[in-house]
Image: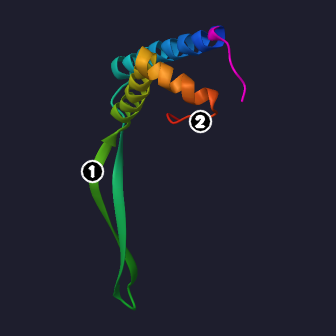
């Protein structure tokens, strides 16, 4: 078991603070600068009309997903968890387990 110094622990805290700001700025930029880009969720059903005519397909468009909102949500969730790690009580618990080579938050 390797003991890390307080200086290394503080640099890890600074790392999480900087990652919070990076993810928050990225998510804000994506939300405000990106155009609405949607992807349709389509299913295709193949059926046989009769043996002489061949196989036909029927496409059904169920819904569309906005990728901008999905990417924004992912980055905001990531920023939120980095913000939680900055909290002293949670950070001390996190560091204690990292010294034992256990990372519960990964």
Residue 94, percent from left and from top: 51, 26
Q: Main secondary structure of the magenta part?
A: loop
Q: Which mark is residue 9?
A: none
SS at circle 1: strand
Q: Which residue is mark 1?
A: 63
Direction from residue 21 to residue 32 in the image, left or right: left
Give the quarter of the figure containing the N terminus: top right
Residue 34 rendering spot, x and y as whole percentages: 38, 23
- State which tag comes first along the sequence, 2 or 1: 1
Horizontal side of residue 101 vs 66, given as left or right: right
Image: 17 above or below 46: above
In the visual, does 92 lie left or right of 65? right
What label does residue 102 carry, if any?
A: 2
Could you say where residue 63 lies in the image, as x and y percent from the top left? 27, 50
First to last magenta residue range: 1-6
Name the quadrant containing residue 66: top left
Numbered disc 2: secondary structure: loop
**Front-most of residues 37 and 100:** 100
Q: Residue at x 33, y 30 (%)?
A: 36
Q: Is residue 35 left or right of residue 17?
A: left
């Amino acid at each position: 078991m390797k003991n890390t110094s307080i200086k290394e622990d503080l640099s890890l805290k600074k790392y999480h603070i900087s990652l919070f700001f990076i993810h928050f700025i990225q998510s804000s930029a994506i939300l405000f600068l990106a155009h609405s880009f949607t992807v349709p969720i389509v299913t295709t059903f193949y059926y046989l009309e009769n043996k002489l005519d061949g196989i036909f397909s029927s496409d059904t468009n169920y819904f569309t997903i906005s990728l901008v909102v999905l990417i924004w949500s992912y980055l905001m969730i990531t920023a939120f968890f980095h913000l939680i790690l900055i909290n002293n009580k949670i950070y001390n618990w996190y560091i204690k387990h990292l010294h034992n080579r256990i990372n519960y938050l990964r």
